[in-house]
Every structure is written in C-alpha cells, then in structure tokens.
C-alpha cells in the first residue's frame, strides 16, 4: 500500500439530539499505525475542515482504548465496530486510500451528539431480565459452587460481552416498530441461567422474555453472530433460551 499524504474522513455530525444531521469532511496528515480514535484526537488539536473553516471538535465516546468497554462503537464505512481497534492502515488495505473513511453514529440508538450515542436501552434490558447473580450479603462464605467444564466452555465467552451495540445495530428486528430486547440480553439470560447461584432467578428471567419485545421477536437473521467483536455465539444462546422459554410456557400453562 502506498501511504497517502492525508487521512481523509467523512463524518456524519449532529449538534444535539433533535437537530438535523449533516456531513463534515476533514483530513489530517497521515501517520502509520493510527486508529480511528487517534485520528479524531489529532484533529481535535486543530479542528479545521477541508473548506478551511474553523469548526467544533467532533464528539465521540471512548474509554478503555483496548476493545473492552464498547463505548467507542460507531459505523465505520457502514460496519458497526469499535473505533479503537479500527486501524487506518487495515481499513486502507480493504477499501483503498483514495476514498475518505466514512464515520457515522449507530442508527438503532438515540444520538447525543455527532458520533456519541446513548446505549441506555441495553442496560435497561439487562435489568428487565435480572442479568446478575443475586448474592445475599458480602461475608466470606467459602469457595463458591463450581461450574462444569462443559458449561464453562460456552458460558465464559458470553461473559466477555461489552454491551457495545454491534448486535443490536445489525439486527433487523431492532427498529422503531419493535421493542425487541436484543441478542446480547438473551445471551446474558443463557449465561446466568446456567450459573449455580444465578439459576435461582431463572424463572423470572424466562418470564421477562415472554413479554413484549421478548424472544419471540427474534427473526433468526443471524447478523448478530457475524458482527460480534468478541465472537460470541449469540445464535446458539438464542436457540438454547428459546427452548427454555417454551418449557417454561408449558410449565405455566399446566400449573394453572
């Protein structure tokens, strides 16, 4: 790859949650081994667009800078991914360096400003299904119950979920006409229902998935598995939890 003189970005901006979005073209001198976050940070030092106009620095969100927190997720050339792990040189290898790199906020979440979005709905959904292990007290109760290796093998990858929103962004059933709770939430139900202590809340989690926006809203597009940056087998979890929900529904029916 021939190194370009400048790194060019085309950024979809929005001044506030209710304002109309618009596009801004910017560029900075090329340096090797930069990621999208470092480009935005470099531009912030001297925020002048390609028209030579002084503009407000571009707003985005980041935290860990090592693909763990999920805060910097955005659309990069139309693909939902983390901007901290999106290396400019790799992007150029795939798309070429003669075109600007297009940055936009995720479309399934409210925009706060520019590339910063509000992922609160994902955390609200986790609360709906009680995605935690309920422990009564903090005193030393000795070694906790063990989890079988065969369970640990599939459960541990789910624990790496960083609530980044990639699976929600790629899911066609997450839209303005649906309250679908999302693939990541269902996967967390799968994990906590298999936990020796978390299993105590299993029925409540499954009951929550029977309500509006529950697992029945999944259309099995399987986009979620393809885009997950942590390689979580979300479709496996959705299938497993669907079986649990069906068994729970039959149990409720016969218990009446």
Image: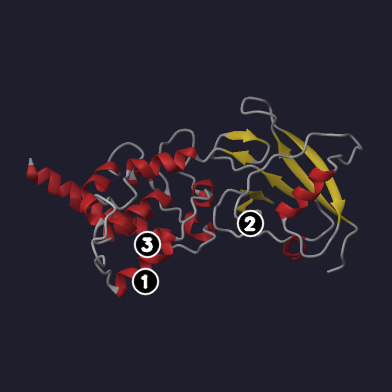
First-in-chain label (1 vs 3):
1
Q: Return the residue nearer the eye: 74 or 220.
A: 74
**Residue drawn at x 64%, y 42% as measured from the top left:** 105
Q: Position of residue 48 (x, y in %)?
A: 87, 39
Identify the secondary structure beneath mark 3.
helix
Earlier in the chain: of badge 1 and badge 2, it is 2
Q: Quadrant of residue 234?
A: bottom left
Residue drawn at 39 percent across, 41 percent down: 125
Q: Which residue is mark 2?
A: 65
**Front one among 238 and 155:** 155
Q: Residues within 10 Å of mark 3 (few under 14, many from 20)?
A: some
Residue at 45% of width from left, 62% of height from top? 232
The quadrant the C terminus occupies is top left
Q: Is residue 19 left or right of residue 131?
A: right
* Residue at the farthest front position: 139
Q: Is residue 33 left or right of residue 64?
A: right
Where does label 1 land, which residue? 153
| Contact check, label 1 and label 3, Cβ < 8 Å | no
Which residue appears at 77% of the width and 52% of the height? 39
Q: CA distance from mark 1 to mark 3?
A: 13 Å
Q: Quadrant of residue 3?
A: bottom right
Query: Separation of disc 3 and disc 2 at Cα?
Result: 29 Å
Number of marks in the rendered image: 3
Numbered circle sitting on residue 236:
3
Can residue 180 be seen in the rendering of this structure? no
């Amino acid at each position: 790859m021939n190194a370009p003189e400048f790194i060019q970005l085309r950024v979809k901006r929005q001044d506030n949650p209710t304002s109309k979005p618009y596009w801004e073209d910017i560029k900075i001198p090329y340096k090797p081994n930069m990621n999208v976050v470092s480009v935005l940070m470099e531009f912030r030092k001297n925020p002048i667009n390609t028209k030579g106009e002084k503009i407000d620095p571009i707003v985005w969100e980041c935290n860990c800078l090592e693909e763990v927190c999920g805060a910097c997720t955005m659309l990069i050339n139309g693909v939902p991914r983390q901007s901290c792990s999106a290396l400019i040189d790799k992007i150029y290898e795939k798309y070429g360096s003669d075109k600007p790199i297009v940055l936009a906020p995720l479309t399934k979440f409210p925009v706060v400003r520019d590339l910063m979005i509000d992922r609160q709905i994902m955390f609200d959904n986790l609360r709906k299904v009680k995605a935690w292990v309920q422990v009564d007290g903090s005193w030393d109760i000795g070694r906790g119950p063990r989890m079988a290796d065969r369970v640990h093998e599939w459960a541990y990858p789910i624990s790496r979920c960083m609530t980044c929103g990639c699976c929600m962004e790629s899911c066609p059933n997450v839209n303005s006409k649906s309250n679908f709770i999302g693939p990541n939430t269902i996967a967390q139900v799968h994990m906590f229902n298999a936990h020796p202590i978390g299993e105590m809340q299993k029925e409540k989690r499954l009951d929550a998935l029977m309500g509006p926006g529950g697992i029945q809203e999944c259309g099995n597009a399987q986009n979620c598995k393809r885009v997950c940056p942590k390689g979580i087998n979300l479709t496996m979890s959705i299938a497993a939890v669907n079986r649990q929900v069906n068994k729970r529904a039959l149990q409720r029916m016969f218990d009446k």
